[in-house]
Amino acid sequence: MDFEEKVQSVENIFDGKVIKVDKETVALPNGKKAYREIVHHHGAVALIPITDDNKIVLIKQWRAPLRQVTLEIPAGKMEPNEYDDPKKTAIRELNEETRYQAQNVELVTPFFTSPGFADEKIYLYHASGLKSVSDPLPQDDDEFLELVELTLPEAFKQMQAGVICDSKTIMGLLFWQLMQ
Amino acid sequence: MDFEEKVQSVENIFDGKVIKVDKETVALPNGKKAYREIVHHHGAVALIPITDDNKIVLIKQWRAPLRQVTLEIPAGKMEPNEYDDPKKTAIRELNEETRYQAQNVELVTPFFTSPGFADEKIYLYHASGLKSVSDPLPQDDDEFLELVELTLPEAFKQMQAGVICDSKTIMGLLFWQLMQ
């Protein structure tokens, strides 16, 4: 069976700082026309940072789309000079958000957050052998963060409470649990 | 520390069939102004359907934003009459996409796919005791699907190959592995 939808035309709806939105007209496998609303994103990284005393380092922050405070693993968007090397982003974000550097930074898996309407791809890393950085990088001036370090059972409690509530962080907890 | 960003004004950019895009002006905790690009989504459900011979039921389909074929767990958007009962959506989508009905449909966790720019919330269910439906519901006429049933090791191979590549399906595999 042929699944491909052939793009016939693309209308750009919005070209923002973080996202770009297109409306595409596609030809379905049966020849009929359909429309696809697509959010483009430059891609991001996330880290599962585990301290030497086996705690996960999480970020407490406000999330505008959810209108709530969340606990999430450190993450950040790739800069243009990092598109060919997401590990660079991972090391930079770990420094910026947690003030840690890691002896080991290993790719766990890349994944798409929401393939129905967005092309956002996140590279998920495992970081261990954490030490305080000697060269703290400047933080984004519109980010207000607080660090929290939790054991695995404490983290699962925060998930049940709905404070840990996003896909990359829940995936991070599950991968961490499978590593125990 | 106060994290809240107070919304000062909202500009609607796009009001589509699947997504709505707003640009919000917010006041940061330090009083400065910032802009947030936000994708609104009505919410969805996804299921981890496990057959009596311990295979996961996956959907092969084209994903326009990724320009590729993927294998994903069954999922679908909530209809307006289902917003107060996502389990209804889960049962309907399982029928529409897989032609199965399930003896047990249990909530595993809700999660947000991408809290940095989107409010999309997915309710993830575990479905077991699968039987063929006697009353197949009509499928969306712009969806071309094929069913695939895989063992846990087969599914992890498809993940390593990048065919299973989205957050809800990878989370589904990890939860399933932890249930073994």
Image (tube, coloured by chain):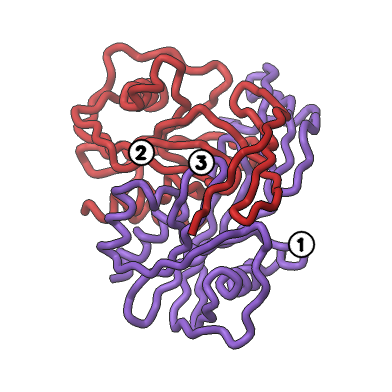
Chain colours: A purple, B red
Q: Which residue is mark 3?
A: A67
Q: In this image, B119 relative to B53: left or right?
A: right
Residue in the image at 37% along x and 36% along y: B123
Which residue is at the far bottom?
A134
Residue A108 image point, x, y percent: 47, 65
For the residues carrying marks 1 and 3, which lies nearer the camera in this image? 3
Tell me if A177 is positioned left or right of A76 in this view.
left
Left or right for B148, reference A131: left
State the image quarter where residue A136 is shown: bottom right
Q: Determine whether the residue tagged by mark 1 lies in a helix, strand or loop.
A: helix
Query: Front-most of B119 and A24?
Result: B119
Distance of mark 1 from mark 2, alpha carbons?
34 Å
* Residue B118 visible in the displayed image: yes
Q: Residues within 10 Å of mark 2 (few under 14, many from 20)?
A: many
**Residue B124: mark in rendering:** 2
Secondary structure, mark 2, is: strand
Letter of the chain that mark 2 sits on in the rendering: B
Density class for disc 3 (Cα within 10 Å; few <14, some 14-19, many ≥20) is some
* Residue drawn 77% across the image and 31% down it: A13
Picture coordinates of residue B81, whole percent (x, y): 41, 14
Residue visible at 36% across and 50% down? B173
Residue pointed to by mark 1: A80
Residues behind callouts 1 and 3 on a single chain: yes
Q: Nearer the viewer, mark 2 or mark 3?
A: 3
Left or right for B100, reference A47: left
**Mark 2 belongs to which amino acid?**
Leu
- SS under mark 3: loop
Q: Is residue A109 above or below residue A19?
A: below
The picture places residue A86, in percent across and down from the top left corner, at 64, 66
Q: Viewer-proximal residue, A44 or B7?
A: B7
Give the x, y percent position of residue A59: 48, 62
Specify few, some or many for label 1: CA neighbours under 10 Å numbering under 14, 14-19, or 20 or more.
few
